[in-house]
Image (tube, helix red, strand yellow):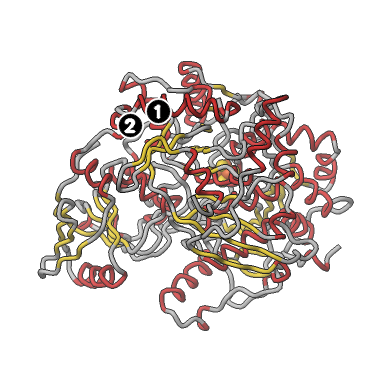
Amino acid sequence: MQAFTTLTGTVAPLDRADVDTDQIIPKQYLKTIQRTGLKEGLFADWRQRPDGTLDPDFFSNQSQYQESSILLTRDNFGCGSSREHAPWALLDYGIRSILAPSFADIFYNNCFQNGILPVVLTAQAIQTLFDRVLSKHTYQVTVDLAEQVIALPEGERYTFTVDPFRKDCMIKGLDGIGLTLQYEPAISAYEARRSREAPWLF
Amino acid sequence: MGSQTLFEKIWNQHVVREEPDGTTLLYIDRHLVHEVTSPQAFEGLRLAGRTPRRAKAALAVPDHNVPTTDRKQGISDPMSALQISTLENNCAEFGISYYGMQDIRQGIVHVIGPEQGLTLPGMTIVCGDSHTSTHGAFGALAFGIGTSEVEHVLATQCLVQKRPKTMEIRVEGILPDYCSPKDVILAIIGRIGIGGGIGQVVEYTGSVIRSFSMEGRMTLCNMSIEAGARAGLVGPDEKTVAYVKGRPLSPQGDMFAQASQAWLDLKSDPGARFDKVVELRGEDIPPQVTWGTNPGMVTDVTGRVPNPADIEDEKVRSATQRALDYMGLTPSISVCDIKIDRVFIGSCTNSRIEDLRVAAKYVQGKHVSEKVKAMVVPGSGLVKQQAEEEGLDRIFREAGFEWREPGCSMCLAMNADVLTPGERCASTSNRNFEGRQGKGGRTHLVSPAMAAAAAVAGHFVDIRDWA
Ligand code: SF4
C-alpha cells in the first residue's frame, strides 16, 4: 500500500448525500479480475446524461478537476455494496483523500486498505469548503495525517480524528496481512483453545 | 462480568488479542466467497506467496454473474465467463470447496450458507458482500468486507477490528395479517434512515421478531446494511436449533447436542445495555413500498409519494426532488396508482421457499397483467427443486411468470437480466439505487406478496383487501 503522509491537492466537489457504491462504480465495471483501470467506470452513470452526452456540470468532466486528489462530499458517502472497486476507481482517478461529514462503514474501511484517507469533518466545515470550492476555479487544501489537520489557504485549520492503528499503517504504508501474521502464535493458541471449547467450529 | 449483550458475548469469544486502544484481532469462523469480490484477493495471495490458513473454513459459489437461463449453453459474456472460471481455478488451486454452476447446491451465497448448515449460531462469518448481515438471523456475527479483507481472512483467518456500538430494535405487538418481515425491515429503515445504523450492530428483539420463521429472520437481518448497520442479530432459540439440525455441514449426533446447548445459552442478559434502543409496534406496520432511490425512501401502501413543495429542509427537499425525477413520479401520487412494467421475485432478501410459497398464493389461478413482464428467480438450486416438487413453478408459469435458474439476477443486473431505461419494477430485492437493476431502471422494493399482487394488477395494491 502506498504510504500517506501529507497531501496538497485540488478539491473536487460532489454535492450529494448518500452516494452509494453502485454510483461510484456501476456493476458493468465489476466483471474485471484486476484492481486497476477502473477510472473508466468512476461515476459512469452520473458522468453521462440519459441521452449519452457528457454532463458538463459533473466534476470529473470538468477540466479543472482532472488532477484533483481530494474529493469533497456529503453524509453517508459510500453506502451500499461492499465492492472495493469503489475505492480502486477513485484511486485510479487520483483521489487520495475524501472529506465528508460521515461515511458508510465498509467503504470507510476499504479506503484505508488502499491508501485513501477518509476524513470526517463537521457539517459546518464541509459547508465552508463547498462554498470556497464552488466560488473558485480551483481550490487547494493540505491534508496532514501526522498532525491530523486540514489546512485551508485562508489559514483555517480543521482538526480531525483517526484511529491510531490505522494512522500508523497509513503513514508507514504497512501491509496489514504481514502485521497480523506476526501474531501467528496467538492465532494458533486461540484455535487450539476454541477447538476444545466449541469443537463444531473446526 | 455483568450483563452482556448477545453481540458482546460473540465478540468476546472471538478476540485473539486486543491492544490497549481497543484494536482487536478478531477470529473468523467461516468465510463465504463469490466471483466478483475475490479474484484480486486470490491474486494478492499468489503475489505474496501465501496460502489460505484454513481453506476448509471457506466456501465459494458463483452467483452474481451467472445466467438464469438454460445453463447448458455456458456463459455468452466472455468477461463473466472469465470471472467465474477464475473463481473455479482459484478454489481448485487453494483447496476451497466450490459449488459450480451445474451443482444443485449452487445459489446466492447468502441463501446457500444457511441451507447447507454452514451458518451456525455464535459464529463470526464474513463475505466480500454487504448482505452477509443475513446470517445474523442465526445469532451469528456476520458482516460484509472488502476484497483486501477477503485476502486478509484467507491468509490469517482473522480481521483487525474496533468494537462497534450496539443498538436494540425492539418490535413488540402483533403484525397485521398479510404483513411480512420485509415490511418490518423497510419500516425500520424508513424510521432510522439509511445511515441510522452506521458503526453499530443491531439486535432485533420483541414478540414480532420472535414470531418470524428462520427465513423471515434472514429477510430482516439481510437488510440491516440498508440502514447502514455493520450487522444484524436475532438471538438463537428453538426455531434456530430446529432449522440447523440435520443440514449437510452442521454438526451431527452428540456434537449437535453439545452445540445446541451452547447456542440456546447465547442471548442478551436481562439488563444488558445497548448504546441505543429503538422501539416499533407491529400493529403500526402495514405493507411497505419504496418510492425513491434509496431504501429509506419508503411509505405505507396506503400512502402517497411525498411532495417536495411540502418539505422545509432544503437538503431533504432537493434529494426528494431528484429521486422523484429519476423515478418519473408525480409528487403526491397515491402508491396504489403507480403502474409497473416488470416484477422481480428473487434476491438474497426474498428468494427462499417461503417467499415463493407466499407469492404463488397470490398468483394461483390468476394471470400477470398484459402490460407486465414478471420473473421468479429462486435463491438456490435446492430452493428451485423444492418449489418444483410443490408445483409452485407450474403456478408461476401458468400465471405468466418466467421461472429461472438460481442467482442474483436482476437484484444487481450484472447478467442479462436488466431493466431498460425508464422501466418500472416491483422487486423483492434490497436496493433501489439509481441504475441498480439497469441503467435508467426504476425500482420499488416490496415484499413477495406485494410483488406478486402487483404483477397481476399491473400496479401496486393493498394486499390486505385484494383477493
Ligand atoms: S442477491 Fe443481490 S444483494 Fe444479494 S448477494 Fe446477490 S447481488 Fe448482492
Residue at figure coordinates x 37%, y 25% from the top left: B43
Q: Which residue is mark 2?
A: A180
Residue tagged 1: A187
CB under 8 Å between callouts 1 and 2? Answer: yes
- The structure residue drawn at horizontal position 34% and vertical position 47%, both measured from the top left corner, is B22
Please provide percent x and percent y for residue B235. Answer: 63, 49
Residue B263 lies, in percent from the top left, at: 64, 40
Circle 1 Cα neighbour tier, 10 Å, few/some/many (<14 / 14–19 / ≥20): many
Q: Establish whether ligand 1 lies closer than 8 Å to the Cβ of label 2.
A: no
* A93 lies above or below B70: below
Q: Chain of mark 1?
A: A
**What residue sits 26% from the left and 43% below the top?**
A115
Type of amino acid under label 1: Ile
Nearer to us in this view, B57 or B75:
B57
Q: CA distance from mark 1 to mark 2?
A: 9 Å
In the image shown, does B110 or B433 lie closer to the viewer?
B110
